[in-house]
């Protein structure tokens, strides 16, 4: 299905109609080359007059609850950014959900015992999927000390999910209540934690210093679940073959 | 341009600008919509690269704030790309008359 979009050029727009004349294309190329040269020249000639925020961040790092400065910026100093990022992911997920109705009776995952995924797929599934999920958990934990964190962990777990659910044996039911709950739990926990710490400190998303480490880990865990589910949904909605599930379920 | 000015940071930044230019050119001259989405992604990657490489200043550790912004930006770019591909797929499904011509 996806191959058709890539190769069937005339379905989206006709190349011979949409293509620019060569002279205009060359003109565009020359203009962009000039623009890039100008930008590189500006980059080289400009003196850096700002010290940046590195010293501010490192001086506040011991109050943030984590040791990795990037995680401290993401989840503590500029946590609004991360909150809105997860909100953007949820909005995209809502747009791409295949069907609007929720059915509470349906289970999250359906297993077809009769389907044979093949030797290669089943052994990949047996060894790679649990490894990916464990690596995701490690990534989440290590984000406090070194590069890593919720998005990296979510991407790894989504990889495991893609491996599992592009298989014929397992199918995920996007109509189920559980799937929607997994999609939205990250944003819900984030906002609720933001208000809960506001009771203590008076500011939305300003963590009390004593519990900052635990709150960041809690929010990141919930965010990881949501990010993994959202990325899985994005993949399946664009490239997946899940549609038959919703019809005969 | 003095050759001594050509530090790795400058080279990374210049590569980011070059990627941006390649993406912009692709966005303008390539007619197919799928490749336009790819071109926008190349542009975005160029800007991320410029931002990350300008976070490193001489002799001190890299500034974590641009790194965090790029990390957020990557997630939003992934979501935007997926949405664009989804819309392309919908347009493709809804345009059967184009196939018969």
Image (cartoon, helix red, strand yellow):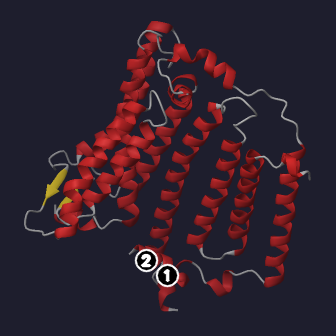
Task: Report which residue position mark 1 lands on.
Answer: A7
**B29 is higher (above) or lower (below) than A101:** below
User: In the rendered view, would you say B87 is above or below A92?
Assistant: below
Give how far across and how far down residue B60 sits, in percent.
70, 29
Q: Is residue B59 left or right of residue A99?
A: right
Residue A90 — which label?
Answer: none
> Does B65 sit left or right of B93 as displayed?
right
The kind of secondary structure element at disc 2 is helix
The quarter holding residue A113 reads bottom left
Q: Looking at the picture, how far across and down is residue A206, in whole percent?
A: 51, 16
Instruction: Point out residue B12 in the picture as x, y percentages from the top left corner.
Output: 71, 50
- Residue nearest the viewer, comparing B94 with A25: A25
Image quadrant in which you'd find residue A19: bottom right
**Residue A184 visible in the current orientation:** no
Q: Residues within 10 Å of mark 1 (few under 14, many from 20)?
A: few
Residue for point 44% across, 16% down: A212
Q: At x 28% / y 51%, what residue is drawn? A: A101
Residue under label 2, please give it: A3
Give coordinates of residue A190: x percent, y percent: 42, 28
Q: Is residue A122 visible?
A: yes
Image height check: is A237 above or below A104? below
> Helix or strand or loop: what does disc 1 sit on?
helix
Farthest front residue? B4
> Given the image, what chain letter belongs to the residue carrying mark 1?
A
In this rendering, is residue A186 above or below A25?
A: above
Direction bottom: furthest residue? B101
Cβ atoms under marks 2 and 1 closer than 8 Å? yes
Foreground residue, B43 or B91? Answer: B43
């Amino acid at each position: 299905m996806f191959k058709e979009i890539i190769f069937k050029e005339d379905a989206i727009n006709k190349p011979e109609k949409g293509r620019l004349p060569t002279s205009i294309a060359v003109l565009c190329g020359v203009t962009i080359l000039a623009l890039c040269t100008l930008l590189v020249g500006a980059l080289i000639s400009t003196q850096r007059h700002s010290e940046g925020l590195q010293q501010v961040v490192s001086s506040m790092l011991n109050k943030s609850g984590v040791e990795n400065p990037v995680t401290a910026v993401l989840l503590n100093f500029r946590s609004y950014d991360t909150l809105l990022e997860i909100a953007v992911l949820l909005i995209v997920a809502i747009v791409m959900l295949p069907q609007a109705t929720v059915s509470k009776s349906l289970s999250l995952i359906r297993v077809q015992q009769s389907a044979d995924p093949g030797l290669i797929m089943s052994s990949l599934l047996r060894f790679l999927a649990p490894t990916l999920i464990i690596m995701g958990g490690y990534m989440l934990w290590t984000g406090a000390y070194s590069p890593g964190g919720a998005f990296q962990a979510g991407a790894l777990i989504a990889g495991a999910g893609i491996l599992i659910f592009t298989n014929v044996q397992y199918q995920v039911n996007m109509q189920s209540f559980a799937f929607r709950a997994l999609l939205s739990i990250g944003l819900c926990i984030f906002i609720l934690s933001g208000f809960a710490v506001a009771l203590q400190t008076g500011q939305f998303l300003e963590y009390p210093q004593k519990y900052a480490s635990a709150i960041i880990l809690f929010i990141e865990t919930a965010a990881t679940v949501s990010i993994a589910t959202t990325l899985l949904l994005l993949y399946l909605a664009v490239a997946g073959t899940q549609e038959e599930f919703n019809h005969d379920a | 341009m003095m050759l001594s000015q050509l530090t790795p940071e400058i080279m990374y930044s210049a590569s980011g600008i070059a990627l941006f230019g390649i993406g912009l050119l692709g966005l303008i001259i390539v007619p197919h919509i799928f490749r336009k989405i790819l071109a926008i992604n190349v542009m975005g990657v160029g800007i991320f690269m410029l931002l990350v490489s300008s976070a490193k200043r001489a002799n001190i550790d890299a500034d974590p704030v641009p790194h965090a912004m790029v990390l957020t930006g990557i997630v939003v770019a992934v979501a935007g790309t997926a949405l664009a591909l989804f819309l392309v797929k919908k347009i493709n499904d809804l345009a059967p008359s184009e196939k018969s011509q």
